[in-house]
Image: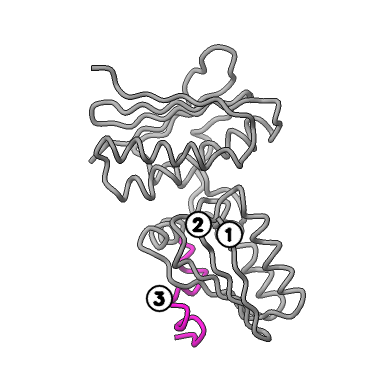
Amino acid sequence: MSFTLTRDDERLIVDVDGQLVVSNRQEFKQLVLDEVEQGARLVIVDFSKSAYIDSSGLGALVSLGKRIREAGGELRLAALNEDLRTLFELTRLDALFPLYATRDDALAGR
Amino acid sequence: MTAPRHDWTIASDVNQIAPIVEAVAEMCAAAGFSSRLCRLNVPVALTEAMANAILRGNSNDPRRAVHVCAMVESEMLVLEVTDEGPGFDLDGVRCTPEDPGCMEREDGRGVFLMRKLMDQVENCCAQGTYGHTVRLRLRRA
């Protein structure tokens, strides 16, 4: 389980490799919040290498989304597999976050 | 024939969840559960149950233990997660995504997800010196 952050001016891309769960959600939140503090405003989380998320991971995304919106930015989620989409649909969080098929779609906002 | 059964006893440490989840998913795959159940339902629901036991039941106290028992019966996976806490009324936890304010909350989705991903979630009597057990059941098909 690891996170790779790629920063380009106000854009931040976070690659999640493995699960986003109770054991690493604080690390994930802090890494992203540090970048938001330093000016990142469009944050894209790429889940193409992620298998599943638990409720702690979903909660971390909810919390981050709120903080990023308060800073005038936006959190977009990309490349969720069918299982991950199921979790967002079950919890209705697909209504809270824009879900994009690919990272490029998320960057373009289409 | 005796149903395959595995038991683990761990200290309260969320870093110890993943290896057990992986082992139970492999156990289910070997027993013929669908790949979707092994990829999604079992890992997420067991992670939720163990996280609840560690963080809430045992208050994240590493001196307190969590016991996990996984049994694959003829058509059913049975998981029991036991902590050393006082327990809580599982039936009293009925929040859903439709509840006012739920969408913006960081926590409170764990029991809801367990119920959605398992066929049955219930409290049951703990064995021995432990305090509180949650039992999860999932049908193979």
Q: Residues within 10 Å of mark 1 (few under 14, many from 20)?
A: few
**Image height check: is B43 above or below B61?**
below
**Image quarter of the C terminus of chain A:** bottom left
Q: Which residues are magenta?
A: A92-110
Q: Residue B27, located in which quarter of the rendered image? A: top left
Tell me the subunit letter for badge 1.
A
Residue B34 shown left or right of residue A63 in the figure: left
SS of the residue under disc 1: strand
Q: Residues within 10 Å of mark 2 (few under 14, many from 20)?
A: some
Tell me the subunit letter for badge 3.
A
Q: Mark 1 sits on what residue?
A: A2
Q: Which mark is residue A101?
A: 3
Q: Name which of mark 2 and mark 3 comes first in the sequence.
A: 2
In three-dimensional space, the C-alpha distance between marks 2 and 3, rounded to whole angstroms, equals: 18 Å
**Image point (52%, 45%), residue name:** B110
Residue closest to the far right? A37
Q: Position of residue B8 (x, y in %)?
A: 50, 26
In the image, residue A105 lies in the stretch drawn in magenta? yes
Closest to the camera, between mark 3 and mark 1, is 1
In the image, residue B9 lies in the stretch drawn in magenta? no
Q: Name which of mark 1 and mark 2 comes first in the sequence.
A: 1
Q: Residue B78, located in which quarter of the rendered image? A: top left
Q: Residues within 10 Å of mark 3 (few under 14, many from 20)?
A: some
